[in-house]
Structures are given as C-alpha cells and as structure tokens.
Amino acid sequence: MPTRVHLPAAVPPLALERLNSLVENRTIFALDAFELNIFETHHTALRVPLRLEGLALTTMLRGKKVMHLPGRPAFDYLPGESVVVGEDELMEIDFPDACTCQPTQCLAVAIAPDSIRQTIDLLNEHYPRLEAHQPWELAGPEHAHLTNTPELTGTLERLVAVSRTTNAAKDVLAGFTLQELLVRLMQTQARQLLFQDYTKHLTTHRFAAVVQYIKQHLTEPLPVEKLSAVACMSKATFFRLFKREFGLTPVEYIVRERLAEAKRLLCHPLATVAEVCLRAGFNNLSYFQALFKKYEGLTPGAYRKQHIPLH
C-alpha cells in the first residue's frame, strides 16, 4: 500500500561548475565520530564501484539508484529509503535515470566502529530490550534495506544540519545526535523485524503476540490494559518497554496500523470515506480526517481520488 515518503530536508545540489565529477561527486564533512558524505550523480552510469570506511547508513534524497551488494539480488533504491552497508563492503551502483536536470543525491554516514560499540554497550547495560536473548545490535543484511520512519528521518535532518554548521561545539553536538541516530536505526530495524514478520516470533518475543492481537482486533477498542495483559506485564512496564523497543508508543502504533488499513480501503471504488473510517477502527469521522491529513499530508478524500483509476 502506498506510504507517505519521509525525506530529510533537501540539500541543494551543487552547481555544475563546482562538481569534480558528474558521477558520484562527493562532498565530505569530517567529524570526530563519523563522516558525512553527500553524493551527487548528474549522468547515467552502470556498475559504479563505491566502498566506504566503517559501517555506513546511506539515505536516498533524490532520483533512483539500482544497488548491487554482495550476496543479495539487485534492488531499486528510492528517496525515503535507507540502506545499511557493512564495513568496507563493496557497493556497485547503477544510475539509470540521472541527468543534469534530474541528478541523484544520496547521504552516507560512515560511522567509526568504536562509536557503534559504545552506543550498543550503553543501551544493553542501562536500557536492555524486552527479551534478554535479543540484545541491542544492528541487524544483519536481511534487514539492511529500510523504509525511513519519521523518527529516523528527523534525526538524519539534525545530523546533516549539525555537520554543515560552523558551531565551535559541533563535534559534541554531532556525537549526541549520532547516538540518537543509532538508536533510531535499531528501533527501525526492530519494527521491520517484528511488525512485518511477527508470526515467526510468537514463541520467542512477547511483543509479537501483541502485534498479532492488534492486527486481529484492529476495529475493536484496544486499551493498553488489554495489550499489557497479552504481553504478561504491568501496564506501566509494557508502555515503557514497547516505546523503548520500537521508538513509538502502543497507541501510536495502533493509529498507524489503522491508517494503513484506511489507505487500503480507500482504494476501493465503492467505499465512502465515512465507511472507511468505521471499517478501519475509527469511530469519529472528523478525528479520522484530521489524523489522516496529519500523517499522510492530504485528506482521505484527496487520497482516494489519487488512488482510484479513472474510467
């Protein structure tokens, strides 16, 4: 189902006379804990090799790439998505549509291993995850290609802003922002792992049963008291650990699931907005319309017109 794309604030492309190369022109902002790279390509190209020092979080801003990573099928890489690239991993990249009038642009945050280890150790010592057998860590290659969450996008925006500033304390500020970025990244991977594949984890993760219950009872009232009982923990503990694990509250997750269902229903040509509101679990039309516009950037009616083909 189409999802609103969450992009960091745009970085203006360089003027052509300032480019050193039309393919993967690189602008570097070097800080103590990481290196921020902005890559621009203004010409079609195939199988361009690129290797970054340290683990890197890359995020597409403009245009389209096709990524070739070791041991994985090639895939389209689009704005609003991120890819985690392993330390010294060779990327080969196609730029099928790049041109001077429509350049591609990508961020790459290359992170020193010590910075990653310090953040992970801090989390595991003081803010452990719900299940002891699943400590905080960056997920493997199968969860390296991500759709950006609003929280991850917001942190990336702040990281880019502090990297480009002339503030004398920017390395200190950047270090704190990098820690938040790593936390947001692991929370995003945790969402992808559990929200999309919850059936695989019903016997190993208590929140998988909660996700299943929410999906099966989406049109019913879903009080936190009931969800905490499904997870076999107190209301306060459940609320705190759910937000720690995924970076959003149970209520926020329910809202996003109901909005996703609403978007699916709005694509049906015979469904009215009022019917969709009720069938997606909302009992107040005005609240549904306001919430939909807040999250999706347009009203349910406008979304419906965009996604129902004209005959």
Image (cartoon, rainbow, N blue to C red):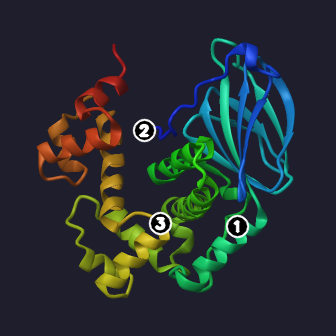
Neighbourhood count class around disc 1 (C-alpha, 10 Å): few under 14, some 14–19, many 20 upward: some
Residue at horizontal 12%, vertical 43%?
A: 286
Which residue bears the numbered disc 3? 246
Q: Name the image quarter holding the N terminus.
A: top left
Mark 2 nearby-residue class (10 Å; few <14, some 14–19, many ≥20): few
Three-letter residue code for mark 2 = Arg
Q: Position of residue 289 (x, y in %)?
A: 19, 40
Three-letter amino acid code at disc 1? Ile
Whether residue 172 sits left or right of residue 286 in the image: it is: right
Dot 1 or dot 3: first in sequence order is: 1
**Number of the label disc, if any, that sits on residue 116:** 1
The residue beneath circle 2 is: 4
How far apart are labels 1 and 2 at the CA level? 30 Å
Determine the residue positioned at 67% across, 35% down: 106
Residue at horizontal 67 percent and vertical 64 percent from the top = 139
Check disc 3 and give the amino acid type.
Phe
